[in-house]
Each structure stands twice: as structure tokens, then as C-alpha cells.
């Protein structure tokens, strides 16, 4: 089963650009994920359970490194998508 996740990260500090870029760079380092970034969000797709596990690990890492950060996430069943994401 495929998963498509749309994520936005909002670090709660004045220096917010670097933590967002580091999070996106880490997501791009996984060969099993397809990552597409826009100005307001990042779309990640891959196999459902491994993708959820990677997202959980990377969000936790960001919280440890940055402190407070808000993640807004939307999750879709990628098997039901009409077009490749």
C-alpha cells in the first residue's frame, strides 16, 4: 500500500529557515521516498509503513534538535490516487 503525505514544518524560533531545510534535506536522502517541495509544503510518497516510520523518526529528530516546532500533515492513500505523485 502506498502513502502520500503533505507536510509543513513551523519551527517556533526566529531562525526557522535552516531547520526546515535540514528536515527537507534529510527526507531527500532516503532512496525509497519520492519528495517534492514547494514554497509552503513538502509532499512525500512511498510504501505506507516504512514512510510513516521515516516521517516519525525525522519529526522526532527535528523536535530534539530544534525544540518546539509544529508539523501540519495530511495523509492520503496513495493507492487511490489517480495520478503519480
Image (cartoon, rainbow, N blue to C red):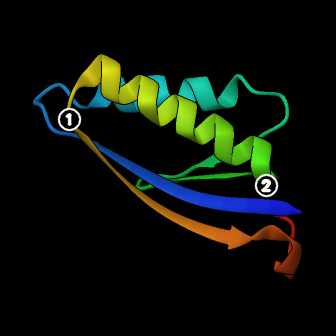
Q: Position of residue 81 (x, y in %)?
A: 82, 78
Residue at (78% x, 41% y) in the render: 50
Number of numbered discs present? 2
> Is residue 37 shown to the viewer in this render?
yes
Closest to the observer, 56 or 40: 56
Task: Residue 32: name its quadrant.
Answer: top right
Q: In the visual, does 56 lie left or right of 60?
A: right
| Disc 1 target residue | 68
Q: Position of residue 85 (x, y in %)?
A: 78, 62
Q: Tell whether label 2 touches label 1 (CB within 8 Å).
A: no
Closest to the observer, 72 or 21: 72
- Give the vertical position of 7 relative to 76 (above or below): above
| Disc 2 target residue | 48
Task: Estimate how packed mark 1 is, as few (under 14), some (14 to 19) or many (20 or more) residues with alpha carbons within 10 Å.
Answer: few
Residue at (49% x, 54% y) in the render: 7
Q: In the visual, does 46 lie left or right of 1?
A: left
Marks 1 and 2, how far apart at CA: 27 Å
Amino acid at each position: 500500500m502506498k502513502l502520500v503525505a503533505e507536510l509543513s514544518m513551523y519551527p517556533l524560533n526566529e531562525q526557522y529557515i535552516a531547520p526546515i531545510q535540514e528536515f527537507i534535506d534529510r527526507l531527500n536522502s532516503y532512496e525509497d521516498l519520492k519528495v517534492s517541495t514547494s514554497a509552503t509544503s513538502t509532499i512525500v510518497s512511498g510504501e505506507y509503513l516504512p514512510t510513516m516510520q521515516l516521517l516519525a523518526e525525522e519529526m522526532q529528530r527535528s523536535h530534539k534538535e530544534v525544540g518546539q516546532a509544529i508539523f501540519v500533515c495530511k495523509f492520503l492513500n496513495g493507492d487511490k490516487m489517480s495520478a503519480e505523485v
